Amino acid sequence: MAHGLIPWSRRFVAVALTGMLVAACSQTPSAPGESSPPAAGSQAASSAPAEGEPKLGGELRFQLLRDADAGYDPALATLSTVYTINGLIFDTLGEVQPDGSIEPSLAESWEISDDELTYTFQIREGVVFHNGREMTAEDIKYTIDRVMDPATNSPRQSVFTSVESVEAPDATTLIIQLSEPFAPLLASLSDISMGIVPQEEVEERGTLDEFPIGTGPFKFVEWVRDDHLTVEANEDYWREGLPYLDGVVFSFNDDANARAANVRSGTIDFLWNSPPELWQVLNDDENLQVFGGEGTQSFQYFLLNMQKPPFDDVRVRQAIYWALDREAIRQISRPDTTTPLNAGFLPASHWAGLPEDEIVYTQDYDRAASLLEEAGYGDGFEMEIIALIGSDFHIRTAQAIQSQLEPLGITVTVTTVDSGQQNEARDSGTFDGMVTGFSGTIDPDARFTQTFATGGGTNYVDFSDPEVDDLIEQARQTSDRDERADLYRQAQLRIAEVGPMAFIYNYHFFDTLQSYVKGYVYNPQLVDYRSVRQVWLDQ
């Protein structure tokens, strides 16, 4: 076994794979030779196919675009690649299913009071942390309190402002008291960033960045930064008979062509979020299977540093937004796997998305030039746009924006940086513009409160607008989805008008697996790879 991974002995539980899979719709793999990816927003009508009796053992070779910037503490993570790995190491109170429902996990059940202010959870017994200690409700209280504590500096802190108290009256009962109704609470607690952690390990180590310990199906073994991270099967996992694999070795590669070549040659078994420009090549390979086609509400954006002139002037930001042709950018950047966003960040197919015919921004150079003239920048200016090395589609977007701003006299330099440099520029506020993306959240509240509400953990340029804050707060307090949708649409329109970023397009994940990798269930709702616990190798 590579990297010192030692298989463990298990009693085989004879159970059909389909009985272990979530009972919900999932995206089936595309057929080799299919001419185009599944339509954005489409939902496959069939469940994952029965694939025979699972085989125990083996090591899954799983390749990601990049490693963590800092580490794998769930309370501190912001990267999709970190969420992917953490989904194998940690468990949460509930789990989001491919159909959008939330099923019990570490919580066996829950009750909500009539006034929607008290949530009582019955906690599962017999769950053991990777360090051998049994988990109790006190650990869940500690995990939530830790995220809410300003000293932790969790980007998720702002999500839980409605939580008044968290109590664990006994080992199997957790009570959360709210100061006001908070409709997205269950969804927020089911996010992998709320992975339950053992208090003593955090207090001993300071964080779990370099040694993540949870209750999930796999246990952390080793991390060689920018090379690989290894996990092995948790022999004490509470879901009987799982996982099937002995372990998973995650590798990292920021070269799109190399990643595609690796999966085609059989060097790796599972390619995460395949390069979109190589989708057709991978899909046509009869030795591979491609999953995906749903947006997961992930979106690309062009962030302007509104704390720095001239971007502190809303007219300059609006001029740039009016100068962009998002459809043209999409065609240049990632044509087959995207949907343009001319206003908000949620796709039209989402329950809170803006209708397709409600277009706000179309390219209008006359309006853009007028706004620049009014702001005192009629002759243009110079600026730098940074994009991440290895994210070729982000780089192509930055180059397209560079071309589209030129007629306004805005001279753009595109600079590619590694993730550490990107984070340093973002956190220190030394950048002009940045092209990057955000992964989707199961409920819009998490993205709104973290990124667009005053003081949010991923509100990188300190955007603050009372109207946006009020709309977000109203949406949090009602459980009427139609009312929430209307409030979120209003918030998106306001952000598009005065906010710090231009939304460019919604993009869709595609995973490429060897044909012998069985049991994987693609989740179109969000970046979620917890179904790897059900994966097995037919070799």
Image (cartoon, grey):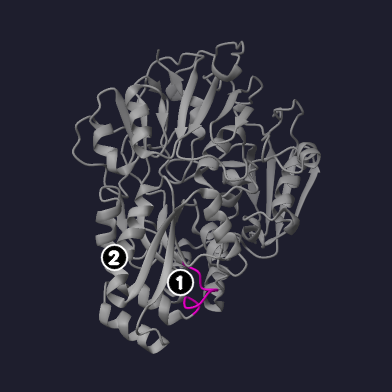
The C terminus lies in quadrant: top left
Which element carries disc 2, helix, strand or loop? helix
Write down the residue under mark 2. Answer: 403
Q: Which is more N-terminal, label 2 or label 1?
A: 2
Q: Is residue 405 above or below residue 153?
A: below
Crowding around mark 2 (Cα neighbors within 10 Å: few <14, some 14 to 19, many 20+) is some
Q: Amino acid at mark 1?
A: Ile
Q: Position of residue 80 (x, y in %)?
A: 50, 45
Residue 99 found in image quarter: top left
Write down the residue under mark 1. Answer: 495
The span shown in magenta is 304-312
Which element carries disc 1, helix, strand or loop? helix
Q: Is residue 536 visible?
A: yes
* Position of residue 178 in the picture relative to residue 524 (left or right): right
The residue under the point 49% across, 40% down is 66
Q: Position of residue 373 (x, y in %)?
A: 36, 87
Residue situated in front as seen by the camera: 425 or 213 = 425
Residue 208 found in image quarter: top right
Q: From mark 1 to mark 2, how far is it between C-alphas?
A: 25 Å
The residue under the point 37% across, 83% down is 372
